[in-house]
Image: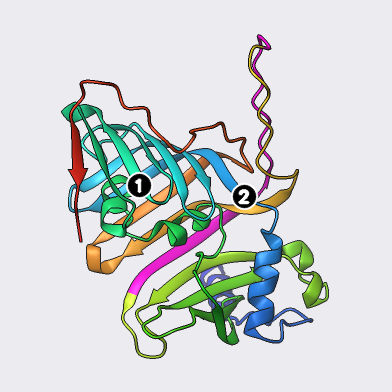
Amino acid sequence: MILRTAVPLALAVSALACRSISPPPSAIPDARSAVDRLDATYASVTGISGSAKIDYLGGQGRVRGDVSVLASGPARLRFALTADVVGAAGEVASDGVRFVADDKGHGRYIVGAAKPCNVAKVTQVPLPLPELVPMLWGMRPHLDGPIKCDSISWSGDGHYVVMMSRGGPGARAHELHVTPYPSDWGKPWAQQRLRLLGVVAWTQPGDGDLVYRVTMKDHQATGTAKPIVDPDGLSPDVAPSGPQVSVELPRQIHVEVPSKKSDVIFKYSEAFVNPPLIPGAFELVMKPGVPVEESVCE
C-alpha cells in the first residue's frame, strides 16, 4: 500500500515543480513602466548600513569572513573587513572617485582610482561602483545618461524579464528580473511595488557575451536606521540620510563575474536603509609614517 500511494504523490510533486506561474492579473504593459515602478519602490532609499557574511571564491581560493557595509548611492562605499580579502584589510572606503584600503596585514595603505579592477582588490567584485553599490540594497544598477527600456516579457518562473540599456554605442545590455511584492500581486500594476530578483549584464544587446550575473533572494522588510546620538551631548545628532521607510531588501546577494572567475555571496545578518552619514564617512584618515602604495590597473 505504501508503494501504491508513493508513486502518485511523487508524480504530483513533480507536476507542481514544473507548473508555470501566471503573471499578475494586472500586468505591467511595457519595459519603461516596469523600470519606473522599480525606481518608485526604492525612490526614498539613499543607501544601506549593515553586517554581512562574505563568501568569496576566486584566485585566492575560498575566503569567508565578516564585513560591515556602509553604502550610499550611486557610488560611495565603506567596508570594514575581518576576512583576509585584501591582505588583511581593516577598512576600505571609496567616494566613487578614489579608494583607500587599510592593509593591516602588510602595514600599508593602498590607494587608487575607483575603477573596476581596483575595486575588485577590495570587494572581489570587479564591477563599476555605480553598478555595484545600488545592488547592495536590491536596487537596479545605476547607469549614466539616458536609459533605453527595450522589452518586457513574463517568465513562467514568476518574474518579468526587462531588457534595459544605456543609450549610445557600445553600451551593455542589462536583463532585470522583477516581480511584485506578494502583498501587491492583486493590485493594479501602477500601484505595485517591485522586488528585484536578479540582474544579468551582457556586452551588447542580442548576442553579447555574459559580463556578470547578480542573484537576489530572501527579501525582508527593512526600515530606516536610527540617528546617531552622542550620549554626552557634546556632538550634534546625525539624522538618517533619508525618510522613514520600509522596503524589502534581499538578505542574500550572489555576484558572479565569469571572465574574472569571481564568485561572491553577501548574506546580511542585519541591515537598515538611509543610514546617518557623518562627515568623512567615505574617507579613511591615514596615519602618518605608514607606507602608501598606489594601485594602478587597467
Count of all numbered marks drawn on residues in the image = 2
Read off the magenta span. Answer: 211-233
What quarter of the picture does the N terminus occupy?
A: bottom right
Q: List the single residue furthest toward the top.
A: 232
For badge 1, the amino acid type reads: Arg
The residue shown at (77%, 62%) is 183
Describe the element under mark 2 as helix, strand or loop.
Answer: loop
* x and y, in percent, of residue 165 in the image: 49, 79
Task: Residue type at mark 2: give it.
Answer: Thr
Instruction: Answer whether residue 238 is visible to the viewer in this image.
Output: yes
Question: Nearest the camera: 256 or 4?
Answer: 256
Q: Is residue 199 above or below residue 59?
A: below
Residue labelled with disc 2: 46
Q: Is residue 236 left or right of residue 112?
A: right
Q: Residues within 10 Å of mark 1 (few under 14, many from 20)?
A: some
**Magenta span has 23?**
no
Q: Residue at x 31, y 57 (%)?
A: 115
Image position of 59 (left or right of 245): left
Q: x and y percent of residue 37 in the render?
A: 70, 71
Give left or right: position of 177 versus 108: right
Q: Earlier in the sequence, mark 2 or mark 1?
A: 2
Image quadrant of residue 127?
Answer: bottom left
- Considering only vertical position in the picture, is 261 above or below 171? above
Q: Is residue 228 magenta?
A: yes
Q: Which label number is shown at residue 98?
A: 1
Residue positioned 31% across, 27% down in the render: 286
State the CA–CA distance, disc 2 to disc 1.
20 Å
Residue 150, given in percent of the width and then of the height, sits at: 55, 87
Kindly check if marks 2 and 1 are in contact, taking CB atoms under 8 A apart as contact.
Answer: no
Q: Is residue 128 above or below residue 28?
A: above
- Badge 2 density bin: few <14, some 14–19, many ≥20, Cα 10 Å: some
